[in-house]
Amino acid sequence: MNIKKIENSFNTTADKKCTIAKHGMVSSAFPEATKAGVEMLKKGGNAVDAACATSLALGVCEPQASGIGGQSLAILHINGKTVAIDGSSRAPSLAHNTFFEKKSHRFIGYKATTVPSTIATLGYLNETYGQLKWETIVKPSIRIAKRGYKITKLQHDLQEKNLEKFFRVKSKSGAKYFLKDGLVPYEEGDRFVQNDLAHTLESISKYGYRSFYHGMIATLIDKDMKINHGFLRKEDLALIPVPIERKPISRRYRGITVYTMPPPAAGDTMLLVLMMLSNLKKSFLRSRSPQSYHFVCETFRKALLYRAQRKFNPQTYHQVDVRTHLSPSFARTLTKSIRDSIDPELPLKETPDIEDTTHLSVMDRDGNAVGITQSIELTYGSKAAADGLGFLYNNYMSAFELENPNHPFYLRPNAIPWTSVSPSIIFYNHEPWIVLGSPGSARIFSVVSHFISRIIDGDNSIGEAMERPRIHSSLDGKISIEADDSANEIIRHLKKMGYKIDIKERFSFYLGAIHAVLKEQSGDGFQGVAEIRRDGTAEGLN
């Protein structure tokens, strides 16, 4: 690993996808959200303050991916302490597996919703680790909701893609709030104003984050759910889903240490990929050969099988330490088991294609680092919105097991859902070097691990690693690959090996969205990248 080459080869871009700054950096999936974070740094806030403001703003201007009706999980290094913040939502007390008459009710509509935890998580972070007042943190998101922002092409396309699903909700509440005139997708460039959401945020700002769970907002949610036959009640909200501080899991990888989210997140799956890759030569991983692609894809598949077979719920199996399952000998055994063609002994069960979630990364002048991955689960969540409050309900009921009571994530009152997120911090010389993460559902672990490998094994800058063509292999042997003309030979060989090929456009929305911040080892400043496949920017404090 050549640190000097990695950092010195970084190039800035006019569109702020790649940026440098002296005194801190914010990277997120929407420009206004990034600016909200930088605003906190300018006011003297730390990385936690900036991350919380960015998170709230993303819920306003990237509503397809997250919002105050969802959940947020974070990893942070603050004042010398590294901690994982499990901000999982909770299943309502009335929810029971036999109450889902149709499978679609887990995905669309009011029954799909768990207890929103994002506000509780951000309030806890601000209260415990922040420096600025809560009202200051919330102010930018109120401003964005009132003034509006311009709809992007990506948002138009996602509304068009999900149009029919909005109208499956009998009340049409999601359509009312998030479609033009409640009927059609907004056009690119249209200004989108959210007055009801602004009023909700003003109330949360004035009365504190707990008011979301106890006051008028909780009463309105309760009424809305009763009218529309949802499970969520004010009694569920009153419990307040306060996040749980967990010990991050970490592993060494060729001179760095990667800290990431433990279960119920998928950080262990991502680390297992890196541990398998560490058994392969750097030169082999750098080669753009069919065989290297094959080996990378098989590490993804073996890691997915590991995740499927070892589902740990820290809420019910707290005595299980996932670290014991990430031994070097286990990773070596898995790597040695990779054959010269697709492994037929791995299950070839088809896996669903799901698109969702967002990620933000922040570092401040003191080297504090925060990564938050947050979601309303699927794109535009349940497609049902809170009447009078202006936000989308999540559809995390889709993440629970309904048939097997012995499953760690079987649906029970107050249960937490399974999630694929893996916000991470890379340490070098015992200090945070890079904070990163990605959305992408089951593809998150492959996007994040491959990004790290391309930096460490390929000596790529974070900008180069972000732009490199991506690949993911599902457990069923389907390879999703960003292809150009140079990939034709690789694709032909992979087909011969037995893979099903799913060709994606050069910069595919489907294959995640890296948002990362790097603190230069020279001490001269920060580098930030915002995903070229999404709408965001990276901006810093100079």
Image (spheres, grey):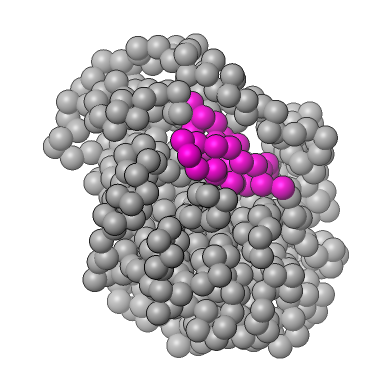
Residue 146 falls left or right of residue 479: right
* Residue 425 on image: x %, y %: 54, 52
The magenta segment is: 247-276
Residue 463 falls left or right of residue 476: left
Q: Nearer the viewer, residue 413 or 173?
A: 413
* Residue 305 on image: x %, y %: 56, 25
**Residue 485 higher or lower than 534, as above or below:** above
At a point 58% along the width and 24% down the height, the residue shown is 328
**Residue 506 higher or lower than 154, as above or below:** above
**Residue 389 higher or lower than 239, as above or below:** below
Q: On the rendered image, what quadrant is the C terminus found in?
A: bottom left
At a point 26% along the width and 15% down the height, the residue shown is 496
Q: How many marks?
A: 0
At a point 51% along the width and 66% down the height, the residue shown is 363
* Residue 183 on image: x %, y %: 42, 70
Q: Nearer the viewer, residue 209 or 38?
A: 38
> Which image quarter: residue 34?
bottom left
Residue 237 falls left or right of residue 513: right
> Which image quarter: residue 399?
top right
Residue 27 falls left or right of residue 116: left
- Asked if residue 261 shows in the view, the reply is yes
Q: On the rendered image, what quadrant is the N terminus found in?
A: top left
Q: Nearer the viewer, residue 310 or 26?
A: 26
Q: Nearer the viewer, residue 504 or 446?
A: 446
Give the farthest residue toward the left. 485
- Asked if residue 106 shows in the view, the reply is no
At a point 59% along the width and 19% down the height, the residue shown is 329
Residue 180: in magenta span: no
* Residue 75 on image: x %, y %: 61, 55
Residue 266: in magenta span: yes
